[in-house]
Amino acid sequence: MNTQAVTSQTANISVEGKSIELPIIVGSENEKAIDISALRQETGYITLDNGFMNTGSCQSSICFIDGEQGILRYRGIDIEDLAEKSTFVEVAYLLIYGKLPNKTELEDFSQGLTRHSLLHEDMTHFFSGFPSNAHPMAILSSMTCSLSTYYPGSQDTNDDEQMNLDVIRILSKLRTIAAFSYKKSIGQPLIYPDNSLSYCANFLNMMFAVPSEPYEIDPEIVKIINQLLILHADHEQNCSTSTVRTVQSSGASIYAAISAGIAALWGPLHGGANQAVLEMLENIQASGDDYKTYLGKVKDKKSNIRLMGFGHRVYKNFDPRAKILRQAADKILSKLGVKDPLLELAKGLEEQALTDPYFVDRKLYPNVDFYSGIIYKALGIPMDMFTVMFALGRIPGWLAHFKEQRDSGVKKIFRPRQIYTGPTQTTYVPIDKRA
């Protein structure tokens, strides 16, 4: 159930001898904010908050994070329960429509995803236009935007029926685009969707099946793909989600907003973190160091060497998603019997860091990116697809935020202010008189 934030107190701010009262907004989990909407109008001042670390851009009922306590909830439900008991499709419905679906709603939603998994055949030719080494995130973003040209009705963002149909199309077709981009990169023929398979099983089949032999889908691998996607499905107002909401505020189509979100996620400081973990492990291996030597370098402030996949900007405790994936990683690596030096190196690094007072005292625990990269590698998913997997998981959150903002009644385009620091008024100098 959604709970509207309430206003019951005020904050007094004094600027140049003038005192004004600003409302204090209290959320359902007792988070507090000062509503500064009238600050500039009343005082002529704005606030400056580089990186928006102390700025709330909206009110939202989708996701709750308590970084100090290590809590993550979707629509009030603990991530641990969803990861263990739910499926990605059910969680997508929960995020987008605000409640867990009943049996009929889930069946209808799942059938919609099945019916809309195919791309228009013309779009399959687009893949041949990309270089063989094109990054899959570039393909995913551009193809997502291209989808809008096949569904021009999406330009009417006020049509509820159209938007619900576009939600289904995006959730279903983007996994097809992702799998096709992988097949393109390795020179294998495209494997079309199979309507007899579940959402995640269908994705695995499109990724790894070939026409020349049968591909057996392991239900345990399907379960862990479900878990990985669930754990990445939303995470409050991160860079890519804020990008989606910013684009939505302009009135652009849902395809344009999701395409922009994918582009934002592509950044190495955002969605590329799990890839950075594997690159770190490769560098350790190439240098000839063992994990103990590397951790010693990390502790040396003069070395400028970072430990990737540990700590989190939001969580000041153990990342709750990492706890889930740690167990999943142990289970899947044992099942697959993978003998990979990089995975052995990762395991040693983890064990050493979890017992080293330097990292424990600083609460530098492994985060979700550390374990997700290890699992993806064990499953045979290549490194440049890691961020694509992140994107596939995050799509429901992006769609939920697009829909929530559209339905909020707030029709203001996002338009942050700035503090100008450039030259004051300067005279134009003709080119023949310039030094």
Image: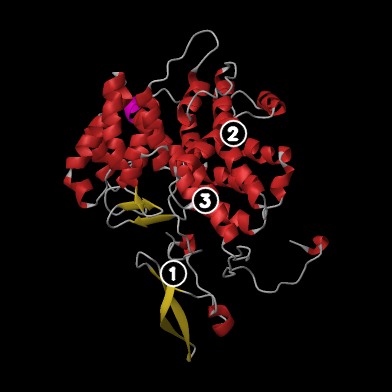
Q: CA distance from mark 3 to mark 1?
A: 19 Å
What residue is at 46 percent from the left and 66 percent from the top?
55
Disc 1 to disc 2, how far (Cα)? 36 Å
Determine the image quadrant of residue 37: bottom right
Q: Quadrant of residue 122?
A: top right
Looking at the picture, which amino acid does disc 2 mark? Lys
Left or right: 117, with 376 as reference point: right
Contact between labelled residues 2 and 3, with CB atoms less than 8 Å apart: no
Q: Which image quarter is the N terminus in?
A: bottom left
Majority secondary structure in the magenta region = helix
Q: Element under label 1?
A: loop
**Quadrant position of the C terminus in the picture:** bottom right
Q: Residues within 10 Å of mark 2 (few under 14, many from 20)?
A: many
Query: Does residue 404 appear anywhere in the picture?
Result: yes
Drawn side of residue 27 relative to residue 104, left or right: left
For the magenta stretch, what is the residue range? 284-289
Query: Which disc, if any, is residue 173?
Result: 2
